[in-house]
Amino acid sequence: MLEIRLSVCALDCPDCCSLLVSVESGRGVKLRGDPSHPVTRGFLCGKVAQYLEREYSPERLLYPLRRAGAKGAGRFVRISWDEALDAIAARWKAIAAEFGSEAILPYSYGGTMGLLNGSGMDRRFFHRLGASRLDRTICSTAGMAGMTEALGVGYGTEPEQFRHARLILAWGANILGTNVHLWPFIVEARRKGAKLYVIDPRRNRTTATADKHFAIHPGSDAALALAMMHVIVGEKLHDAEYVARHTEGFEALRERVREWTPQRAAGLTGIEAGEIAALAREYAGTRPAVIRLNYGIQRSERGAMAVRAAALLPALTGSWKDVGGGLQLSTSQAFHLNRDGLERADLQGRALGREARIVNMTELGAALTPLRAAADDRKRSSAPLDPPVMSLAVYNSNPAAIAPNQNAVLRGLRREDLFTVVLEQFRTDTADYADIVLPVTTFLEHTDLYLAYGHYYLQLARPALPAPGETKSNVEIFRLLAARMGFDDPCFGETEDDMIRTLLDSPHPFVAGISIERLDRERSVRLRLPEPFLPFAAGGFGAPDGKCHFHAETLDYAPPVESRRGDPDLRSKYPLELISPKNDDGMNSTFGHRDAVDRRTAVLQINAGDAGARGIRTSNRVRAYNARGSCALAARVDDAAQPGVVCATSVRWARRSPGGRNINALTSERLTDAGGGATFYSCLVQVERIEDR
Ligand SMILES: Nc1nc2c(c(=O)[nH]1)N[C@H]1C(S)=C(S)[C@@H](COP(=O)(O)OP(=O)(O)OC[C@H]3O[C@@H](n4cnc5c(=O)[nH]c(N)nc54)[C@H](O)[C@@H]3O)O[C@H]1N2
Ligand SMILES: Nc1nc2c(c(=O)[nH]1)N[C@H]1C(S)=C(S)[C@@H](COP(=O)(O)OP(=O)(O)OC[C@H]3O[C@@H](n4cnc5c(=O)[nH]c(N)nc54)[C@H](O)[C@@H]3O)O[C@H]1N2
Ligand code: SF4
Ligand SMILES: [Mo]
């Protein structure tokens, strides 16, 4: 008998699709996008259309495992849940007694966007334990810092309005690869004559279809935005009325951007001055004009400033007034749910009598190798940790593959005195280093509530498929661990539905009228926002006075240390700028077990001139390297990467790469200008051909 069940895609993607799961005798046979969902509109991306391959993969982890070989060797024996939970509880009690509970560090990120399994029972558990807190900076905190500085809040234009735009700027945004459900709205706009311009250092599927591609130097976007402001203000193309009513600090801004001539920006961005001026005029002169920023713009050392400067543009032109205008980086902060009630940070007080220390996840390598890190001369956000990290609890993440400075991370994970627990679906690079592996359910198998970061619909998913083997959800595992640790606070006895009710218990008008009963009926519910939603048409910015503050005194740009205009000593040794953007068929490292994904992430794109100078031809094996490490790849010589830039789409499973190192052996733990973010795309390397013997 064929039955259609509803679900929600939990992957770390702005689209947060609504799914239809065809189920036959308890087994999933097909996944489709829900045609009735206003953003999903009946289709899925290629990688999730095939998700049932992953769901039923023979590589799924089905039973708890205990390590039976050297760390990293990947040899394990099956144990029972009781043995696994008892072993973990006993070890954590011993570590807490000897070193203090902050010697235990949770490490999680985007495996699931579900609130309960992503930041629910786990947070309660680690707060009550008094573990170190993790600053989750690996992806978006630089951009969020920039947005917040500019707008005071972190949300913007809804995707449905892109169909009304006449000019669309995709800025560090590979829409066809990473945000494909925005695309139909862009197609609709272009059918009515809209133009799509893309600002991106490399050619990709999105630039290939665009009306114009501005091949900017990595990490120089703030200079471009400042020069656009120079033209807009200098030529009085701004919306004087909007600026007067809804912004603060315009006179100082006018002074500030005076020096940011297109000529000056041209030298920094690689985009000709005439092109910059024309772009600024067209942006200010076209209504509506909308900007899609994505996180690609903020993975550089100047990432926060890049987002901040770009986010000021629509306030200058008054574009926020237009249906189909404005800007979107994320929509997530409009979901004013009761996260405090879900996460229960107050439980730290029970454990420690204070808040626990914070460890930045981007600096995991340094956190796990404190002595080595202290010997490093580079500037760090914190001193070596005391107490040291003696246990790492990894879930929803694969740090051995995705974290920067991989050699430091792996050195840390190999420490015999580090007790590592990994909750996983697959035997990832990180699972190979675990002392205990716990098998978890997929999003098709558990209940969760989902906000989105690319639209304004809140969604509920119930299990669509049975959980295989002995898998359990993160929520259930942390509930069981709480019992083992003797935590008797009532919140550890809550059901998933209790937790959802807590989340919905919020006084904010955006979530008014949304109950779990309504979610069970409708599954996808629009936040209570006007249609169309124009967040800043009449001010309403996050600052107390409701205005957009230019703060011109701190608005500026200097090239990243690791860039073509950065540190001369580094540049002379490592003259190429490496970017490692998302693979269109992947999801960070989640589909690393697929051969097709592995092949695509094994390639280094290099410009013909740079390749020629090194005797490199397509298909040659090459080594990219710098002082942090090296990574072997297959060269592809073309002009997709501009001169001076090399590009490897990410993230390959390190285990499948020669030498067990992927591209993150090259990337650094240096942090962004604000927000403490990762700087994956500010990375200088040298490339050489590997001679065949
Ligand atoms: N298919 C697929 N989809 C995904 C993911 C995936 O791995 N694969 N990952 C998900 C996640 S975690 C995230 S955060 C989002 C990210 O979504 P995006 O931000 O769209 O993805 P990125 O590939 O990081 O960057 C987008 C583009 O920015 C360009 N870029 C790199 N450096 C710069 C720069 O300095 N300036 C400018 N202007 N552009 C630059 C890259 O070449 C890339 O084409 O995608 C999500 N969706
Ligand atoms: N070089 C380079 N490195 C990067 C990036 C880049 O562009 N270039 N991108 C960075 C960015 S933007 C991000 S967001 C990070 C992403 O880094 P991560 O958040 O670590 O993402 P994934 O690599 O997809 O790993 C997620 C893991 O969670 C597991 N998982 C899924 N659902 C569940 C669940 O319910 N429970 C548990 N316990 N596990 C689950 C999956 O099996 C998968 O192994 O990578 C960063 N690293
Ligand atoms: S990864 Fe993104 S586009 Fe693909 S199904 Fe999931 S939410 Fe939709
Ligand atoms: Mo991300």
Image (cartoon, helix red, strand yellow):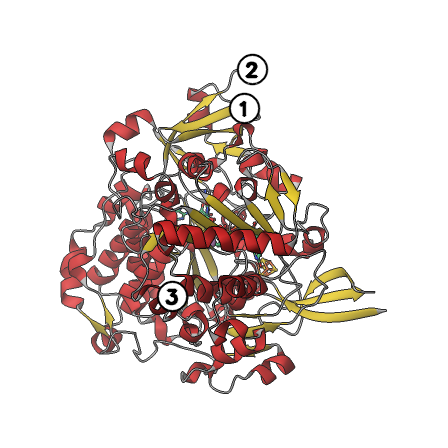
Q: Position of residue 608 (x, y in %)?
A: 47, 28
Q: Secondary structure at mark 2?
A: loop
Are there few (<14), some (14-19), or many (20+) residues within 10 Å of tag 3?
A: some
Q: Position of residue 187 (x, y in %)?
A: 56, 62
Q: Quadrant of residue 15?
A: bottom right
Q: Position of residue 684 (x, y in %)?
A: 35, 34
Q: Secondary structure at mark 3?
A: loop
Q: In the rendered view, does 74 fall on the left or right side of 640?
A: right
Q: What residue appears at the point 44 percent right and 44 percent down from the top-left corner?
A: 403
Reading the chain from its start, which is encountered first: label 1 or label 3? 3
Residue 692 shows which numbered tag? 2
Closest to the camera, between mark 3 and mark 2, is: 2
Q: Which residue is mark 3?
A: 286
CA gap, disc 1 to disc 3?
Answer: 47 Å
Question: Considering only vertical position in the picture, is 462 above or below 137?
Answer: below
Q: Quadrant of residue 548?
A: bottom left
What's under tag 2, amino acid-wise?
Asp
What's under tag 3, amino acid-wise?
Thr
Q: Which residue is mark 1?
A: 621
Q: What residue appears at the point 43 percent right and 62 percent down from the top-left corner?
A: 167
What's under tag 1, amino acid-wise?
Arg
Reading the chain from its start, which is encountered first: label 3 or label 2? 3
